[in-house]
Image: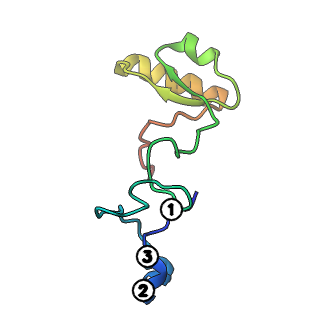
Amino acid sequence: MKFIRRDWFRFGKFKRKKKQKWRRPTGRDNKMREKRKGYPAVVSIGYKKQNRRIQRVIFNLKDLDRIKKDEIVVLGKVGKKKREEILKKAKEKNISISNIKRKKQK
């Protein structure tokens, strides 16, 4: 959903794409602030787009075996020794883990 700044059409600088930044409507009698019918939408809870892919937190090797194709893998709070084992097995299975910092290879 596109959220438009209040009175953007009145001023030339707001008609340019870069200048069209959201500003919360303020003012005592502002209709957008009151979220009245027929006025542009105001940013609020409930407009967020749903993430369709499921996130799985992994704590051990058994959890890694249960991973399906469309799931995002996140490594949980695990020690260094177990983390290295999980990363090695994930590399064998060609599974990418989203919250691991990769070391730069020279």
Q: Residue at x 52, y 45 (%)?
A: 48
The residue that mark 1 highlights is: 3
**Alpha-carbon neighbours of circle 2 within 10 Å: few (<14), some, or many (≥20)?**
few
Q: Is residue 23 left or right of residue 94?
A: left
Residue corresponding to mark 3: 7
Q: Is residue 53 above or below residue 79?
A: below
Q: Which mark is residue 99?
A: none
Mark 3 near mark 2, Cβ–Cβ under 8 Å?
Answer: yes
Instruction: Confirm or deny contact between disc 2 and disc 1 (CB under 8 A).
Output: no
Percent coordinates x, y for residue 9 in the rendering: 49, 81
CA–CA distance in space, label 3 to label 1? 12 Å
* Viewer-closest of 73 and 104: 73
Q: Secondary structure at mark 1?
A: loop
Instruction: Compute the Cα span from label 2 to label 1.
Output: 17 Å
* Residue farthest along the right direction in this orientation: 69
Residue located at (41% from left, 65% from top): 22
Gap between marks 3 and 2, in whole Å? Answer: 8 Å
Q: Secondary structure at mark 2?
A: loop
Disc 3 element:
loop
Q: Which residue is mark 2?
A: 11
Type of amino acid at the residue the image marks with label 1: Phe
The mark closer to the camera, 3 or 1, is 3
Disc 2 residue type (three-letter) = Phe
Question: Label 3 is placed on what type of residue?
Answer: Asp
Say how many tags the image has.
3
* Label 2 vs 1, first from the N-terminus: 1
Badge 3, how many Cα within 10 Å: few under 14, some, many 20+?
A: few
Q: Residues within 10 Å of mark 1 (few under 14, many from 20)?
A: few
